[in-house]
Image: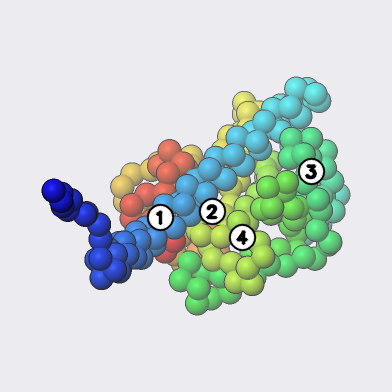
Amino acid sequence: MKFFQKKFGFTLAEVIVTLGIIGVVAAMALPQLNTAYQKHKIEAQLKYTYSTILQGIKMAQAQTGDSSLNTWGYENADVNGYSYEVSKDTFDEIFLPVFKGAVLYPKNKQFNIYSADGSTKLNIHQQYIAYFTLANGNVLGFARAGNYDGYIFTVILNPEKQKLIVGKDVFAMTFWADRITGDIAYKSLASVQYSENTRMKFIELCGSNTSFPAYSTSPPDFCTTLIIKNGFKIPNDYPVGL
């Protein structure tokens, strides 16, 4: 007596069709996954840099007893209180202990920084900035601020790129000392009354093709402020394509 068993399986055609469907779905999902990764990378790096800078300032204040640090290097500065040498020396003294492994670029290092839409090369006075490669491969630029007691940081992700885009590859944040309390407050426009109208203006300025569109501040500062004011999360209406 013969018994017949039905065999289950897939034909070659069915396998090909299934693989094709998987390929289409993957192709549709990959751009979204890449965008999500880019957003997470930016958010994490800005939050890390911000907290590490604050750590360095607090350490320096504790060690020196100088709450404002307002005299560090200023007397040796050049034009309007800016100087590459002062920037370098100040970073070495205050921030090198917390950004361990940071390596200084040669003097006069310049990065090609472009507006958010990529159409315009911006001039943000890089001659006063001391650039350092961080242990994670990113670049941190530092300038001892001009005629006020503060520090300007430029955060560069993907520094190997020949064309760096504001709000995607290049960010900025400024810290300054309150002349009354001596505390270091995060400036980067976060002290401005942040109404919805102001937020919309910052979106416009983040995408500006002008090197210093307002407040003597460059577009990277406005882009960074949008993210930090949103809890270190890139807002849904962020004006820079990722």
Task: Measure how far apart labels 3 and 2 are at the Cα level.
Answer: 26 Å
The residue at which mark 1 appears reads as 33
Task: Measure how far apart labels 3 and 4 are at the Cα level.
Answer: 18 Å
In the current view of this chain or complex, which residue is farthest to the front? Answer: 1
In the current view of this chain or complex, which residue is farthest to the bottom? Answer: 119
Instruction: Say which element carries label 1.
Output: helix
Task: In the rendered structure, find residue 158 and report the number of the disc placed on it.
Answer: 4
Which of the marked residues, 1 or 4, is nearer the chain's N terminus?
1
Q: Would you place residue 202 above or below residue 66 in this image?
A: below
Q: Badge 4: few (under 14), some or many (20 or more) residues near its Cα, within 10 Å?
A: some
* Residue drawn 54% across the image and 66% down it: 165
Q: Would you place residue 145 above or below residue 20 in this image?
A: above
Circles 3, 4 touching at the beta carbon (< 8 Å)? no
**Amino acid type, residue under disc 3 in the picture:** Gly
**Amino acid type, residue under disc 1 in the picture:** Leu
**Amino acid type, residue under disc 2 in the picture:** Asp
Q: Badge 3: few (under 14), some or many (20 or more) residues near its Cα, within 10 Å?
A: few
Residue 43 % position (x, y): 50, 45
Which of the marked residues, 1 or 2, is nearer the chain's N terminus?
1
Task: Measure how far apart labels 4 and 2 are at the Cα level.
Answer: 18 Å
In the foreground, 132 or 207? 132
Residue 144 placement, left or right of 174: right
Residue 54 placement, left or right of 34: right
Residue 77 % position (x, y): 82, 52
Residue 90 placement, left or right of 126: right
The residue at which mark 2 appears reads as 221
The residue at which mark 3 appears reads as 101
Residue 192 shows in this picture: no
Which of the marked residues, 3 or 4, is nearer the chain's N terminus?
3
Q: Badge 1: few (under 14), some or many (20 or more) residues near its Cα, within 10 Å?
A: few
Q: Would you place residue 4 above or below residue 194 in this image?
A: below
Task: Measure how far apart labels 1 and 2 are at the Cα level.
Answer: 27 Å
